[in-house]
Amino acid sequence: MKKTVFVSIVGRPNTGKSTLMNRILGEKVAIVSNKPQTTRNCIRGILTRGDDQYVFIDSPGIHRARNSLGDYMMRAAGAGMRQGDVVMLVADVTRAPSDAEKEVTEYLRKSGTPGVLVLNKIDTADREIIARTIASYAALFDWAAVVPVCAKSGKNVGEVTDELSAFLRESEWFYPDDSATDQTMRQYASEIIREKLLRALDKEVPHGIAVVIEEYREEEGLTSIRAEIFCERASHKRIIVGKNGEILKKTGTYAREELEKVTGTRVYLDLWVKVKENWRESAGMVANFGYDRRDLDGGEKN
Ligand SMILES: Nc1nc2c(ncn2[C@@H]2O[C@H](COP(=O)(O)OP(=O)(O)OP(=O)(O)O)[C@@H](O)[C@H]2O)c(=O)[nH]1
Ligand SMILES: [Mg+2]
């Protein structure tokens, strides 16, 4: 008998939501960085085991939006949360609940959706801190389960899926059993390039970057990709390109290596850097850069 469960992964920025999803899937589906607000869209990760299919919905970290891109990300986070049969709140174990987490529990209470709390980054906390954080979250909501984990090493992550299995219900699957994500290779390529830039760059620059795939062509074991990297200022463009083009070259090399592994082909990557002043302030440009997906439709499951 086939069973399915939709699991919304929500929480503040940088708590390790995407790391945890990748770890559960045993495969990299969502990009990860040490900068907050890495994830901008809802990204589905699919785990099929025997008759059971788990559909995870990774979402942007909950924060106060300061521009049109932020507005989009918060609408996506809300839509992602409403798609789950169960909501998995991922929080940093060293931090007390903040307004963002309280907003989530408020939604759970109103909608009657069950919540599983995952306290991540236990490698950075001692037992006393873990116990204190568990107590402050227990006072907030009647969690179906509380699981302290280290998503980075994988410690206790198996328990998360065990707890979620209680919410599987009889249903046809929504994805073939060999799918790991709903993203197209084109979308994934743009995310991989953005990840390498997030890792190479500091301060304000990475937040103002969008990557648009202009061309994606696969023929005879070679994938040719032309991508435009948009940033918000001419000074940012100089930083992205780097001295003698070094940063851009490195970004291209890392992205190409990873894309070659994923596609199983050779990859030719052509990167161009362009300036679109303050694009994050413009709803139109935000949409043009790909932040206009169906994630915002609301409560539907597919
Ligand atoms: N020490 C430690 N770091 C972790 C752990 N899990 C994730 N991280 C790090 O936390 C940072 C953020 O990870 P992400 O998975 O991108 O976090 P996120 O919640 O998806 O962030 P947004 O997409 O910005 O909302 C990265 O530098 C991860 O390597 C963990 O268990 N321990
Ligand atoms: Mg993320």
Image (cartoon, grey):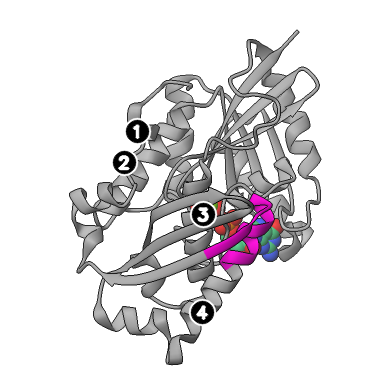
- Label 1 near ligand 1 (CB < 8 Å): no
**Element type at marker 4?**
helix
Residue sitting at x 26%, y 46%: 287
* 260 is within the stretch colored magenta: yes
Disc 4: which residue: 249
In terms of sequence position, does the residue under pointer 3 or pointer 1 come before the other? 3
Where residue 110 appears, x then y in whole percent? 42, 23
Mark nearest the camera among 2 and 3 is 3
Q: Quadrant of the N terminus?
A: top right
Disc 1: which residue: 296
Disc 2: which residue: 292
Where residue 77 appears, x then y in whole percent? 42, 40
Query: What residue occupies the far front of the structure in this picture?
Result: 220
Disc 3: which residue: 189
Q: In the picture provided, is 208 more to the left or to the right than 90?
A: left
Q: Tell me which segment is drawn in magenta.
A: 255-268
Q: In the picture provided, is 37 more to the left or to the right than 234?
A: right
- Label 2 near ligand 1 (CB < 8 Å): no
Residue 12 shows in the view: no
